[in-house]
Amino acid sequence: MWEQIEAFLTYLTTEKDCSENTTSAYRNDLTQFMDTISDQVTSWQEIDHAALTDYVSHLQDKKYASSTIARKVAAVKSFFHYMLDTGRLQDDPTANLDSPRVQKRLPKILSSEEVDRLLNKPVQMTDPKALRDKAFLELLYATGMRVSELVALDVDDVQLEKRQVHCVSRADRHRTLPLSDRAIHAIRLYLERGRPNLIRDEQESALFVNHRGKRLTRQGLWLIIKGHVQEAGLDPDVTPHTLRHSF
């Protein structure tokens, strides 16, 4: 049974061009599903609507949020749709499987005053890392780009003279976004005084680098922003995506 899950995950990567994070989420959800039902069935053909309903009840008993249960159910449905489409199953047991109703909430945003407090926090320092942090915070807020797009930026993607930045979004979609005066100023200072003191390899193409001179990761950027959020006295639940919503 694991072989079919691995084949599905490979299909997501090679055929559907899903990101590593998306594929990882599917893997986690399907692994949990498999662990839950493995002592009841020995093949996918044995799984029926009753078994799936029991699985949803199991998730509810575990006190998962309705949004989490809905995501896990969606992963299972996608898997069985794949099994049906590829001829591995003749019937789809998830056809009439209901997902819990998810109440949509308005995204959390920062006020203008809170944004200024966050963006101005790195200004209190003048070291290379502070110049980097100021630059990517201004860039995030000026463009609304995703963190994955920001850390993937190369130096050549930023065109300060044209006041724009080129990024690649999900599904390999290319976008060109305008830059604000504040973002241009912060990026220029970082390129002139910050990045040259952080990189160790002149061939490094990444725009934003860590203390080792390598491309900054999503996790690394999240931790840096979390630190500035704490120092600015903001809600600890503020994330990089909060800046996207605020934009």
Image: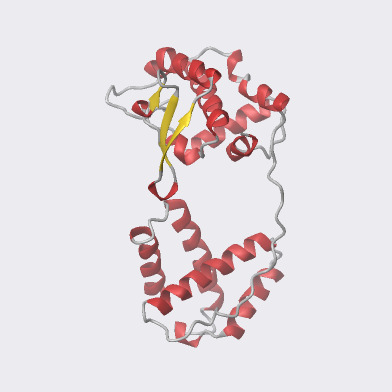
Camera sees residue 202: yes
Task: Assign the N terminus to one quadrant of the image.
Answer: bottom left
Q: Is residue 161 above or below residue 217?
A: above
Q: Is residue 12 above or below residue 174?
A: below
Residue 45, how many percent across, how many down?
46, 86
Q: Nearer the viewer, residue 201 or 173?
A: 173
- Identified at 45% across, 39% down, the residue is 149
Q: How many marks?
A: 0
Q: Which residue: 52% across, 21% down?
A: 183
Q: Quadrant of the C terminus?
A: top right
Tell me where residue 107 sits by quadrant: top right
Q: Does 222 sit above or below residue 188? A: below
Q: Position of residue 84 (x, y in %)?
A: 42, 79
Q: Can you give x and y, in whole percent of width and height, for residue 40 in the image? A: 54, 84
Colouring: secondary structure
- The one nearer the camera, 105 or 127, is 105
Along the line of sight, the residue nearer the viewer: 61 or 78 = 78
Q: Quadrant of residue 169?
A: top left
Residue at 58%, 31% in the rendered image: 225
- Locate residue 182 relative to residue 66 in the image: left or right: left
Q: Can the viewer see residue 1?
A: no
Judging depth in this view, the residue of 10 and 168 nearest the camera is: 168
Residue 111: % across, % down: 72, 30
